[in-house]
Amino acid sequence: MAPLLSSFHQQVRGAKSNPQAQGKKAKVKSKKEKKGPREFKQKDLKDVEQFALCDAIRYLRAFEVGREPTVSKYEIHIRLKTKRDGPVIRNMLRFPHSVQTESRICVVCPPGTRHEKEARAAGAVLVGEQEVFDAVKAGKIEFDRCICHPDSLDALNKAGLGRILGPRGLMPSIKTGTVVEDVAARVEMLRGGTVYRERDAVIRLPIGQLAFSPEQLRDNLRATIEQVKKDAASLNDRIVKEIYEVVLSSTNGPGFSLNGEFKSDNSPDTTSLTGL
């Protein structure tokens, strides 16, 4: 037993004096310490000043004085109470009042087919296969959205446009709903709708033009919240996502946390919050 105990004590002393062994333990410990909570941390709304929609619009319009009304837009930030892992919400929304002044759509589909004719009739600015590939490779990306017909998906992948369109968020994919059979219907929807995606427990998207009335902004806000709730409900039963806070901002203005009310006692008349 004596040799065994002696050997054991030597190993223990060696580990204490061995800086490499200590370094390994420190690394393991630091990894454990770095592991954060499973849920995204959200601030306590009791400590946050919240505003009625009309009051938030009033202040944001003051920040946007002198700005081009078709360029500056109202934006909504929906903060979610959710876990870090698991699926994220992504979808497409058509507003009651269109936010996009003019959305340029590109459609990748077999040339000479009815899909090409219907896409052009729906208002797509660039349609086809090789024509689209050549324009993108030449750096002429003169469109805001890109969708693809399933019959042209292989040709699109072989063209190797992912490295060009991917970083811009323009590469069509099944997950984002931009690879569709009825390209004409999707063109019409995209021209008056918005694609959104949850990032770090926040969904951010433009919700109105600066010239919108409070009533128009309210309608778009309701449609957005209802759609996000549907998206959350359609996830796996074990995945729970809830809307925790809604923040309204603008292109050049700060964010105002909304309290769910349309007007307050001090809100101005809605007609003074409309137009240029």
Image (cartoon, grey):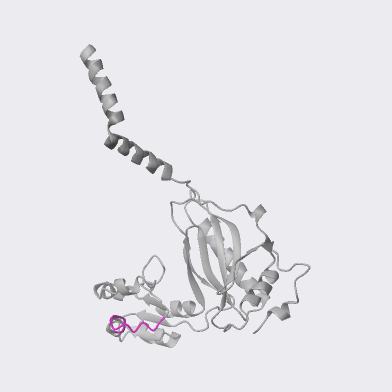
Q: Main secondary structure of the magenta part?
A: loop
> Which quadrant is the N terminus positioned in?
top left
Image point 31% across, 84% down: which residue? 135
> Which quadrant is the C terminus positioned in?
bottom right
Q: Nearer the viewer, residue 49 or 190?
A: 49
> In the image, residue 105 lies at what x, y percent?
42, 81
Image point 47% across, 58% down: which residue? 200
Query: Is the residue 149 above or below the residue 242 in the image?
Result: below
Q: Is residue 141 magenta?
A: yes
> In the image, residue 97 lies at what x, y percent?
59, 78
Image point 66% across, 54% down: which residue? 47
Query: Is the residue 270 above or below the residue 174 in the image?
Result: below
Name the quadrant containing residue 27.
top left
Kindly tell me whether residue 1 is visible in this rendering.
Answer: no
> In the image, residue 109 lies at what x, y percent?
33, 80
Kindly tell me whether residue 23 is visible in this rendering.
Answer: yes
Which residue range is magenta in the image?
135-143
